[in-house]
Image (tube, rainbow, N blue to C red):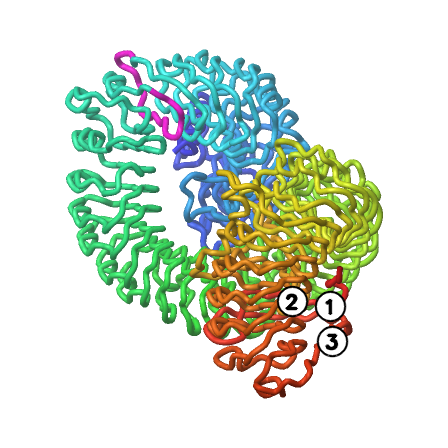
Amino acid sequence: MARATRLLAFFIQIQLYSLATSTSHGHGNTSAAFYCRPDQAAALLQLKQSFIFDYSTTTLPSWQPGTDCCLWEGIGCHGVSGSRNSSSVTVLDLGGGGLYSYGCHAALFNLTSLRYLDLSMNDFGGSRIPADGFERLSKLTHLNLSYSGFYGQIPIAIGKLTSLVSLDLSSVHNIESAEITNLYAIMDGYNLLVLREPSFETLLANLNNLRELYLDGVDISSSGEEWSSALGKAVPRLQVLSMAYCKLNGPIHSSLSSLRSLTVVNLKLNDGISGAVPEFFTDFLNLSVLQLSYNNFSGWFPQTIFQLKNIRVLDVSHNEQLSGHLPEFPSGASLETLNLQYTNFSGVRLSSFSNLLSLSELGLEGGSISMEPNDLFLNKLNSLQNLQLSFAQFSGELAPFFSWISSLKNLTSLQLSDCYSSKIMPPLIGNLTNLTSLEMTFCGFFGQISPSIGNLNKLTSLRISDCAFSGTIPSSIGNLKKLRRLEISYSELSGPLTTDFGHLSNLTVLVLTGCRFSGRIPSTIVNLTQLIYLDLSQNDLRGEIPTYLFTLPAMLQLELSSNQLSGPIQEFDTLYSHMIIVSLGQNQISGQIPGSFFQLTSLIELDLSSNNLTGLVELNSLWKLRKLYFLDLSNNRLSVLDGEGNKSTVPLLPKLSILVLVSCNLTTMPRFLMHINHIHTLDLSNNIMQGTIPQWIWETWDDSLTQLDLSNNMFTHMQLTSYLLPYSRLDSLDLSSNRLQGQAPMPNLLKAVDYSNNRFSSIMPNFTAYLSQTVYLKLSKNNISGHIPDSVCDASNLKVLDLSYNNFSGLILSCLIEGRSLVVLNLRENHFKGTLSDNVSDHCNLQTIDLHGNNIQGQLPRSLSNCAGLGILDIGNNRMVGTFPFWLGRLSDLRIIVLGSNLFYGSLTYPARDRKSREYFSKLQIIDIASNNFSGNLDPQWFERFASMMAKFNDTGNILSHQTDYRDYHDTVAITYKGQYVTFEEVLTTLTSIDFSNNALEGDIPESVGSLVSLHILNMSHNAFKGRIPAQIGEMRQLESLDLSWNKLSGEIPQELTNLTFLGTLDLSGNRLDGRIPQSRQFATFEINSYEGNAGLCGPPLSKPCGDSSNPNEAPLNTSGDHVDIVLFLFVGVGFGVGFTAGILMKWREIGKWLRIA
């Protein structure tokens, strides 16, 4: 509408001027016939030849050689009477034509008389706006290149068009509710156009005549003072300012106050804009539209803005720190739209709206409304058509609100969100029979959806999302014959999909995602001939995908990912298909990819990942997919080939921005990528590419690439011109698990870097100086040596630092322990020495500390107790001293303690009972204090405190990890498991282990150990325990490994131990046990070495029969064996010899290295 209005105004201006000078454009006026200049007609024909008309709304049929171009579609001319050749093209309007061209043809810039140029809503193939040429169009007053798929830097040439009155370069269309159109421009929040060089200020500097500026979706990334000042200085007569989603920062500077002529201000979706809403907006007396939603404003909203006489639209929703009160609106107020949802406004009375006779759309926070009895009768708001209510901070009754809502007789649209204070869907909703649109999101309604919803027979849109409904979809929804949009998502609804959907013949959008629907896709969907968008993802649907879904005449978007769909996909007719999105990932689809997919020339997104697809895919077979933005073929059984060339003069996949080919058997880097202008995300991990990473990878997309993952390949070198990588926008770089050698390059300003599992031998001496923006740095398992530079202390954003398994040395910088930013510190298996700082901050954020395998001395700093969120502490295999740090028990999130192979000493007597100590170590799941000098009796309270080992688990648990904005970090732990030293690369919350071995503990093993019913590993070997083996151990039904060897235990082996049916490893050797060895269940599988060195034991598997008094055979300590790395997969199940669901790296080493005899 805005574009049409501007065009109409321009044409009126042209026509008035034409009448005044008695001119004509050749529309039948015989007294003065004018023809366009031949050179301009030729330029237009060249321009036409550059377009492809496959899916355009026009083929420009009137553009024919030898005809007057002034009569052509979209052309306007202006000339002088009496001169046949003086009529010049002043208007070129191809807006909304759906034309395709890879790049803008240079012939355009021969039309130097143009005043109005509109190329919006076409597709220029992701090419850049030409850097040269626009400066030739010096007469332009109106330029519209919006939503046309241009990419990259906006050229300075546009800033030289000093006559411009209106400029529209918007690259994101309908940001808040986009579903179908122009998805290539909004996927992943990616801004296609940017303003860097020239800057926003430089672009505007000479555009003093500008009245309208539309830059929605252009990445300006400018501070409040910069962009506000640029506008205030350069365009003082600006009337329309629209810069939604431009990555603007704030607060808004006072220099913007000079734009007194503003009628429209749209700054929504810039979450960097902060501070107060400026008071000077009140001075914009002509202001009619103020859009400030989805920003980060705070403070008090100026009341006087509500009272501006011309204000029609005021939207400040989704500014949660913004406060305010509503005034008494004056009589005759013009406000039509008011949205205060998700703000902190308070004391809103319905009587405030009594003078808003034109109010048609209202959005409020339910908790801000002061509901009074008279409001139900006096404030009918007869003009109100659209009501949006959210109740995020409301805990009262909703019934009064629904009584009020039911009185709004003209209400046609109702949106309810965050209704958690009510557990039942309000029955009054069924009485709102005038509703055409109903939306309920994030509500706590449970039970079945009320059948009364079928009474709303005028509904054209119904959306129910993130509610707690269960059961099946009521059949009464089949009564809603006018429905065009139906969404029921993210609930507990289940059962087969009803065939009644096939009777809703007007449906254009059907979304049933994130539920538990099962069975097959209903065949009646074939009747939905108007269906544009179908989303059945994240359910439990089975069977083959019906081919008719790809051939429905109006279908544009098909989402079936994350189901159990199987079988091959048959070929289908693509002649009339306009599909733009096909998402079938995470199913069980088999067979080859149908060639039909590669004929869908409008396709923007194709996701076939995580299926069972087979065969060869040559990338050049996708040459027809000129609009493809997103391609994911990962995790199938495909072999993707680079191919040789392509059949088109247009580069292969010219608009590709996201390419994911994980586990696709790629052997070389796809060469077509060299010719792509802008790649946003590139993931080629887990393939078999080898050799050198080419230089063009580092240089081609330096201003667009944000994620690069080449991990798990076989690259050995990188072709570089500098060890400082050039990327300006890259957020995440993963080169882990290759064979890269030499010096590791450092990317500047990256958020996440992973170089782990390579063969790097060095890194820039002051590499930490480039970590100012880095959140995640993992360099583990290389051969890097040297000290950690002091500049790491300035890396204030660093959350994860993993330098494990290298050759770093020197002291551990105190800032790494004391600082406030780090969450994970992993320096395992290096050569660090010295002591740890005891000045840990009260604001310590550390959750994982792993210093295992260094040469650290001294005592464990007691100030670590300030790290309230600490979950893992591993200081094993160092030279630390002191008594057991019972104070660690205060850390309520502590799950893993490894103190093994140090010089700790003293007794393990539990602290005196008090209220706090009862909760000590309640979450502990792994404790390893082996190979120290602990002595004395073991206090029974130890096992009485391990609450997490007493709980019975019904699943395999969760992986211990740390989430950052850019990638997750998984914790690891190494423990003695079934007699071997094992590294768990992923630690489940159900992995439980106690290792007190190789100390000098004595006395009885406490019977309380039997309460640890979820314990999997118990190792108390090489101590001096005496007495009997507690029969209570037989209650530990999850136990997989039990080692009580080399103690002084006596008596018989308790028969109760035969209840341990998961027990895979048993070692009772080197004790003083006697009597018959139990033979039932699991004990029938153990061999002689489990019992050797017990003189009194008899019966199988020993050769000594019961009653024989022959001398004992002591088992020698195993001190030999080579180091071998293998991957062992264990699975939880019922029966013998089973274990955790995890892939673990087992390291067979000399047992003597890990067992130290005191």
Relative vertical location of residue 534 with respect to residue 573 in this rendering, above or below: above
Residue that label 1 marks: 1151
Q: Is residue 339 magenta?
A: yes
Residue type at the position of mark 2? Lys
> In the rendered structure, which segment of residues is drawn in magenta?
330-346
Percent position (x, y) of residue 292? 45, 26
Quarter-of-image position of residue 409 = top left
Percent position (x, y) of residue 311? 37, 19
Q: Residue at x 56, y 79 (%)?
A: 1075
Q: Is residue 195 magenta?
A: no
Instruction: Judge the density around disc 3: few (<14), some (14-19), many (≥20) Cα neighbours within 10 Å.
Output: few
Percent position (x, y) of residue 571? 43, 72
In this orientation, which residue lies closer to the viewer: 908 or 1052? 1052
Relative vertical location of residue 1113 with respect to residue 1013 in this rendering, above or below: below
Verify CB contact (< 8 Å) between mark 3 and mark 1.
no
Q: Residue at x 63, y 81 (%)?
A: 1088
Residue that label 3 marks: 1116
Relative vertical location of residue 1054 with respect to residue 65 in this rendering, above or below: below
Residue type at the position of mark 3? Pro
Q: Which mark is residue 1048?
A: 2
Percent position (x, y) of residue 152? 62, 41
Q: Principal SS element in the magenta part?
A: loop
Relative vertical location of residue 1101 with respect to residue 930 in this rendering, above or below: below
Instruction: Judge the density around disc 2: few (<14), some (14-19), many (≥20) Cα neighbours within 10 Å.
Output: many
In this orientation, which residue lies closer to the viewer: 657 or 908? 908
Q: CA distance from mark 2 to mark 3?
A: 16 Å
Verify CB contact (< 8 Å) between mark 2 and mark 1.
no
Q: CA distance from mark 3 to mark 1?
A: 12 Å
